[in-house]
Image: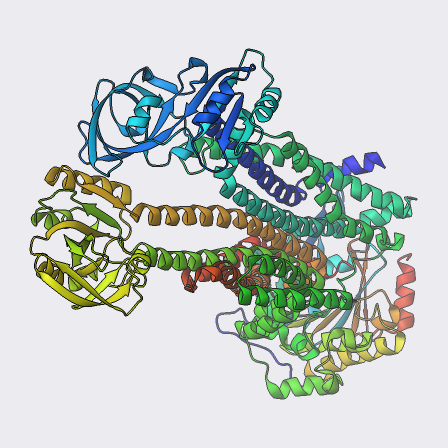
Amino acid sequence: MSAPVPVMTVPGEPPPTADAVRASGLTRTYGSGSTAVHALGGRVGDGTAGVDVAFARGAFTAIMGPSGSGKSTLMHCLAGLDTPTGGQVFLGGTELTSLRDDQLTRLRRDRIGFVFQSFNLLPVLDARENIVLPMQLAGRRPDPTWFDAVVARLGLRDRLRHRPAELSGGQQQRVAVARALLPRPDVVFADEPTGNLDSRAGAEVLDLLRSSVRETGQTVVMVTHDPAAAAYADRVVLLADGRVAGDIDDPTADSVLAALRGLGA
Amino acid sequence: MLRVITAGLRAHAARLVASTVAIVIAVGFVVATVTLSETTRSTMLEAVGARYTSTDVVVTSTTGAPLDDVARDVAALPGVAAVDLARSTSVQALVPGRTGAQYLLVDSVAEDPALRWQHLAGGALPDRPGEVAVSERVGAEIGDVLIATTYDDEGREVTSEATVVGVVDLRGDPSAGINGRAFVVGEQVETWGGLGPSELRIAGWPRTDPPLLAAEVRSGLEGQAVDVRTGEEQAVREAEALTGDARVLTLMLLVFGTVALLVAGLVIANTFAVLLAQRTRELALLRCVGATSRQVRRSVLAEAAVTGVAASALGVGAGIGLAALVSALVGTDSPVPLAGVTVPLSAVLGGLAVGTVTTLLAALAPARAATRVAPLAALRPLDPAPLRSRGGVRRLVAGLLLVVPGVALMVAGIAVGDVLLSVPGGALSFLGVVLLAQRAVPPVVAAAGRLVRSGGVTARLAGGNATRNPRRTAATATALLIGVTLTSAMVVGAATTRATAQAGLAAQYPTDVVVTGNSEDGVPASLVGRLEAVDGVQAATALTAGGLTGPDGYETWSLGVDPAEAAPVLRSTDDLPLPAEGTAVLPWWTVDTWGIEDGDEVTLSGDGGSRTFTARLGDTDHPLLTTTDLTALDPDAVADTLWLRLADGADPAAVVDEVTDVAGAAVPTAAVTGLASERAALDEVLDVLLLIVTGLLGVAVLIALIGVGNTLALSVVERRQENGLLRALGLTRGQVRGLLAWEAALVAGVAAVLGVVLGTAYGLIGVASVLGDYGEVVLSMPWLQVGAIVVVATAAGLLASVLPGRRAARTPPVAALAG
């Protein structure tokens, strides 16, 4: 199914590019001196610069790698949650690294959706309030038709009045997906979205993410260490020791596993 | 373990500031109160007891009969070296250079130098009749000649002269009051109309043991109507009679001290909860590496003990410093004289003990909670706070068990007008309210949160957050609630007391100032205008005076008043009605001597004829008629008395001084009396009391607000992940700060509103039961002040959110992902 790709064009903003997110020469170092940890790129005395990677619009990409490979750091930097030590990140045509905290906050609110591994929802708000929270923070009104469509697709219609404590883990994660999809962001970042779920609930969430890409052209970038989860993606970017170590199109669980083994993980 | 404790104290020193400040303030308050009270007592004892310092034994009459005969018996006792027959009287005296006569209290000077106690500022004490030593207040100088007016047995005026030979320094003796004092030899007291000696001051031989001498005197006077005390006993007795009020004040302040400690306790408990929550992982790690739960509890309690002792010591120092400051500021020139600082050991030890015990007690619950930290917690992320608190039923029952009988007692107290019923009732019900508040506050905060839902997403989130940990919210709000309740109770109570007391005073003393000419020619008609021109005099009216003959056949001095002119001068006509034509307002003594009842007919006659009036009884010394009626009966009646009303807010002392000058210039014999100063004094006392008490309760509120800040700080720690999530989802830093501000405003605002409502009720109930006895209670509601309390408490709550808000705003969005 090839639905038209919804591209938000805002006057005065740079024209849309083919890549939804792009990083060039990205490095991230924690600490300094002899205790410095190079989470991304730029090893001392090593000629290589930072990480260069791009994520296509309307695609479902998985970032994979063993523990300590820098996959979470990469995602944090791409999503504007963390400030890179060096290099640049572009969301569409916007350069993130030059933004001030408030501009970055607004950009996250308006153009990025998040699904985290755990603690995705605010306990004091019910499901509906959680779903519309980012739009309300932005002072925007959700389109009712779109809201109904998202809620229906995620099977949450009967759960809207429930607080997170009254929902199962899978339901909570579906609420988080709905919240991420509702504002039609440029990218949805998912950080181990199935990490805390049993395999059936995990498969449901992955299905939903994939169908949102297929049916509405949503861009999704997911960090995972589970080859089975990665198999739902259109493409897998492999990371090892803070550098891009491989790239697999149309992955299967087996091809991903084989590639990981090749990394010595 | 000790090393862990000291390391912990060092590492968390900054966090302990809140507890320390709370306990320093509370302990300092208690110590300052006790110290000031003790200082007052010793100052008073020194001033009042000055005349007994060299006296071994004092004999007073139990019946008031003169002690001349007793004095002879005493002098005959072998152990007695000297006896002073203390006599007193009073005179009106004219002092050169000052217009108008002064009322002087006159005391005799002991013949024996050993019994003379007066401190001379200059000159000498009188040795013979015709000499006088005066207090500084009289304003006379050595060599001045006073003209004293006294009355002989037949009531005739007698004037005599006395030369000032010395000036006496009374050293702040409060019993001197506003009157001047004069000291003359005993013989002079007698010629000035003094009665026999009312008190015998006895000195024994050198190295006499006063109690032994007292016993000797007592047995020597067996069977006579006298009290025998040692000089010291007498001094304490008189000082206590004067400081009775000060004791009540001390007691009241100590009650507030207890309140401050209670509030401090709540805050400390919260602080320790904050500290321990921040250290859950640390404590769990201790457990993992082998610390027993008992060792963990001991380490927490030891930390509390160290904090408590250190803070209490600081508090004791602060309290003594505060007392010294107050003493230096107030000095001896106040109704409650203070000289230097007398620090009772009990204040120091008591302050230390109270502060430390309060801290330990407050730390008990958090310490117990700390022992429940499972070793596994070190390996897990911080658990979010529990959403519901358990139990509370016992608390509800206990609260109701206290509130219901407490309220019943208060109602009974108002009905009977007995404070002894309503005070315990108030205390019981308030304890109950504090218990119930734990249950009642969270729903009210939730309701208030729903009210502000329209305030946007942050307000809605804050509303939810404020009630997530109901027990903690309740504890925080209760601390503030206690302070606000008591503050507003005081404010409302004082306003009503003032209104009631003023109404009572106005009825009892309707005229501010009375000027009497005391001359046969009366006062010049122009004096009214001249007095009205005095700054601070609002209105004046002249009364005529003449002699009328009543039903008993004796001539009675009577006054004539113009009702229309006098009405605006009087503050109240409740007790002193003004006469209409044909009506005579008669003094209460006419009930006995003339057999008059209110509404009876009474016939009065004078040189101009006689007439029958309708009698009204009122608070007047002389029959009061209209000027027209009086002039008709006594054509010779002249204006002799003036009534003045002072402007509200004028300084009565200054105005009376000027009025005395103006009246004295016109009529040298004029005397000025009045109760304006009493009214002003009452106002002043109420103002000072209110200021002190409000300030002290402000301390409780301040401590409570530290608690608000603490609770928020704890929330920030617990909701780190959540705040990170909000930041990731697009909440700006400002919005995060706003979230905390809303939460603080909700808790503080609800506590303030509830506190003001409760406090108003308590204030009105308290006043109703205290003043119910004295007649009608005039309710007065100081809306402005009460509104200010709510605003200030809420604003301060907002202020308390600033630091935690900044901390929350610094939460990086990545914190949400830190599993």
Who's the residue at 14% across and 41% down the image? B662
Residue B27 point in image, percent of width and height: 62, 40
Which is more toward the observer, B747 or B725? B747
The residue lying furthest to the front in this view is B553
Residue A31 is situated, as x and y percent measured from the top left of the image, at: 72, 44
Quarter of the image that includes the N terminus of chain B = top right
Chosen colour scheme = rainbow
Q: How many marks?
A: 0
Q: Is residue A248 depicted above or below B703 in this figure?
A: below
Residue A46 percent across, percent down from the top left: 76, 44
Q: Where in the figure is residue B334, as x and y percent of width and height?
A: 41, 36
Quarter holding residue A163: bottom right
Q: Residue at x 20, y 46 (%)?
A: B515
**Would you say residue A93 is visible in this rendering?**
no
Compare residues B114 and B584 and report the one nearer the observer.
Answer: B584
The reply, left or right, for residue A104 in relation to residue B148 is: right
Give residue B208's quadrant in the image: top right
Q: Would residue B770 be seen by someone viewing this image from the given angle?
A: yes
Would you place residue B758 above or below residue B620 in this image?
below
As drawn, B423 above or below B7: below
The one of B273 and A101 positioned closer to us in this rendering: B273
Is A74 placed above or below B84 here? below
Q: Quadrant of the C terminus of chain B?
A: bottom right
Front residue of this view, candidates B807 and B93? B93
Q: Is residue B693 left or right of residue B196?
A: right
Report the residue that reaches farthest toward the top.
Answer: B206
- Does residue B127 appear to the left or right of B784 in the view shown? left
